[in-house]
Image: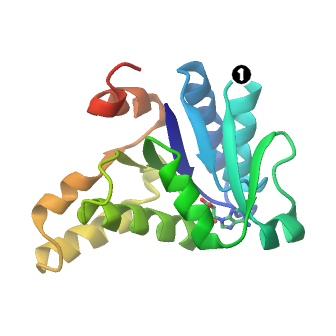
Amino acid sequence: MKLCVFCSASEKIDQKFKDIADETGRIMAKNNIGLVFGGGKLSMMGAVASSVTANGGHATGYIPGHLNESEGGHSDIEDIHIVDTMHTRKMHMAENSDGFLVLPGGFGSMDEFFEIMTWKQLGIHHKPIIIMNAHGYWEPLLKLMDHIIAHNFARPEHKNIFDVIQTPDELMKMLSKHERFKNI
Ligand code: AMP
């Protein structure tokens, strides 16, 4: 099984968030869950991929050519695919994973999360989407989504499109509640 992880590429964030990425990668590798990610080496993205491979797991990255040239892909990862655009990358990440995990991140992670969430809302896919509200980071996002529903811009049942966990420890239990991951 493969989990696509969206998370920060910013080097300026607090170390406690990079530690979350590291721990998540360790738990995925120990439980035989492969990583699909944006292919970069920066910050949490780099940390989760390094941790997966350091713990004997497999990571697959999709990086657009322009980012690969400006930043370089993740050097520890052999399974890196250079793609033409950000859109192609998101398509590959979505198609080649069995579920999605949103760790703390910025606008890039939010773009990836909302795309995958709206695709699920429209029935384009039925894969689990888990938000990890580590250190309460996503609290404002969760409130925004409640606000959207309270004003009828989305239906209450759309809250069931995704799950929320607080720590990496909760990941496997939450995944196993989903039919697709029930044998993990
Ligand atoms: P952000 O949350 O704004 O830091 O953006 C990180 C997310 O967007 C990751 O999940 C990546 O898939 C993608 N992304 C944004 N910037 C980069 C980058 N410099 N290298 C690789 N992926 C990136």
Q: Nearer the viewer, residue 167 or 183?
A: 183
Residue 9, above or below 128:
below
Quadrant for residue 123, please give it: bottom left
| Tag 1 residue | 56
Q: Given the image, on which type of amino acid does mark 1 rest? A: Gly
Q: Position of residue 150 (x, y in %)?
A: 12, 74
Judge whether 30 appears above or below 7 on screen: above
The front one of 21 and 76 is 76
Q: Specify whether residue 105 is in view.
A: no
Tell me the element at label 1.
loop
Q: Where 130 falls versus 13 (above or below)?
A: above
Image x and y of residue 34, in percent: 58, 33
Q: How is the image coloured?
A: rainbow
Query: Quick one: 172 or 134, which is closer to the camera?
Result: 172
Q: Name the residue: 42% across, 60% down.
A: 138
Q: Residue at x 67, y 31 (%)?
A: 58
Q: Is mark 1 within 8 Å of ligand 1?
A: no
Can you give x and y, in whole percent of width and height, for residue 141 in the image? Answer: 37, 67
What residue lies at 25% left-to-right and 63% top-to-bottom? 121
Out of 24 and 111, give the one closest to the viewer.
111
Quadrant in which ligand 1 is drawn: bottom right
Q: Residue at x 33, y 27 (%)?
A: 176
Label 1, residues with CA under 10 Å away: few <14, some 14-19, many ≥20: few
Vertical arrangement, residue 4 with respect to residue 175, above or below:
below
Is residue 82 visible in the rendered image? The answer is yes
- Tell whether 134 sits left or right of 122: right
